[in-house]
Amino acid sequence: MTGAHVAGSPVVSVIMPAYNAAAFLESAIERLLAQTIDNFEIIVVDDGSTDKTASIGLRAAAAHAAVHYFRQEQNGGVARARARAVAESRGEFVWFVDCDDEWADSALEKLVAAARSTGADVIVCGATYVYPGQRRPLVAPLVNDPITGAEAFVLLLDGKLTGHLWNKLFRRTLTKEIEFTPTRVHSDLAMVAQLLAAADRVAFISDSLYSYVVRSGSIIRSGLRRAESLLLVEQAITSAAITLDTRIIGSNSYGYFRLRYVLLSGLKDALTGPYDAEERDEIVSELRSRLTWRLILLAARRRDWKRLALAGTAKLSIPLHHQLLRLAAKQGAA
């Protein structure tokens, strides 16, 4: 460790994992230090980087008392890096950011003010996706008054509340109630679900305070094998649901979640990921056996025509489903 903790407890611990992030880390730290509140700390965990991330982190920690740098000797994934950072943190609240993204200088001030005024354990703010040549607002639920963590969990299942960490401020004590599910994809979703399930109250503000920059090499665009990660995410969210109320497992909201994040995501992964023919056939067969017409009709009930088409073709004809996936990929690239 470098950069000793200053006396007293900060209001917020900003959690920033970094892996081969030399191109972004220094700027990210400087932009965080420009936040309009004073009493916060920045926890950087270097997840076994092989570039100059370490030297940048060490230099920042030596120069700024609010910056604390820790290094994992081996790359273990973003979930483990976040777990280490949270273990080292001391703030009343935690805010998870990615070093290659953007945020408002007033983000922490507004998030903390909302937490103080509402007494909520989780504050959700507006955000923006930034694509090359395009900016798209993050769809957020229209909720004026604070709701329970259980109600927010159902919004997450329904797709009305996103599973992103970065547009949410969490009371740090909530992190003691969760497992940092070690997935390569959708680790945010697993954490958010568990944190919402542990929360008493969740509040929302309309201010757009975070910009998620989608880059060509990001995990959501990479060709990783996702089958194991998707299974772990399903297990984490199922466990959180059971903790809240066992009846959630039989609900339409839970079924809609499984359709989107387990079955359709799993089929897309199997058909487009780096699997051999035997592995692909086994995964596709197992997922199709779980794809019931009841789940497919849930997409129709929500007027989710894109997923209805994907689910229907997956049930009836894998070649047709694969063709629809390719068409959707071309339209997304256009």
Image (spheres, grey):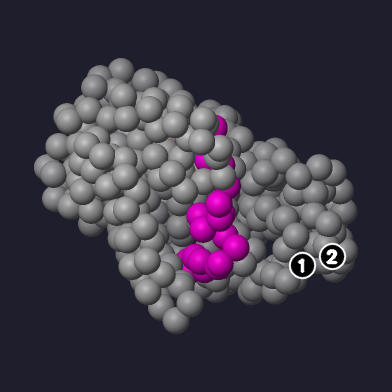
**Residue 192's x, y, as percent?**
46, 42
Quadrant of the image occupied by residue 23: bottom right
Q: Is residue 153 left or right of residue 184?
A: left
Residue 209 vs 196, above or below: the answer is below
Please give the name of the residue rendered at 13% of the width and 44% of the height, measured from the top-left corner. Answer: 300
Would you say the residues marked 1 and 2 are in contact, meaning their CB atoms lie under 8 Å apart? yes
Circle 1 SS class: loop
Foreground residue, 178 or 309? 309
Quadrant assignment, res 113: bottom left
Residue 153 lies, in percent from the top left, at: 33, 37
User: Image quadrant of residue 243?
Assistant: top left
Mark 2: which secondary structure? loop
The mark that comes first in sequence, 1 or 2, is 1
Q: Which mark is residue 52?
A: 2
Bounds of the magenta segment: 210-230
Foreground pick, 317 / 126: 317
Q: Quadrant of the C terminus?
A: bottom left
Residue 12 image position (x, y, % from top left)? 60, 53
Residue 30 visible within the image: no
Is 227 drawn above or below residue 71 in the view shown? Answer: above
Task: Give the residue number, with chain letter if any, for mark 1.
Answer: 22
* Residue under the image location 86 percent in, 48 percent down: 1
Q: Is residue 276 left or right of residue 63?
A: left
* Magenta span includes 94: no
Instruction: Please tell me how crowded label 1 is: few (under 14), some (14-19), or many (20+) other residues with Cα within 10 Å.
Output: some
Q: Position of residue 269 (x, y in %)?
A: 46, 43
Residue type marked 2? Lys
Asked if residue 179 is positioned above or below residue 77 in the image, the reply reads above
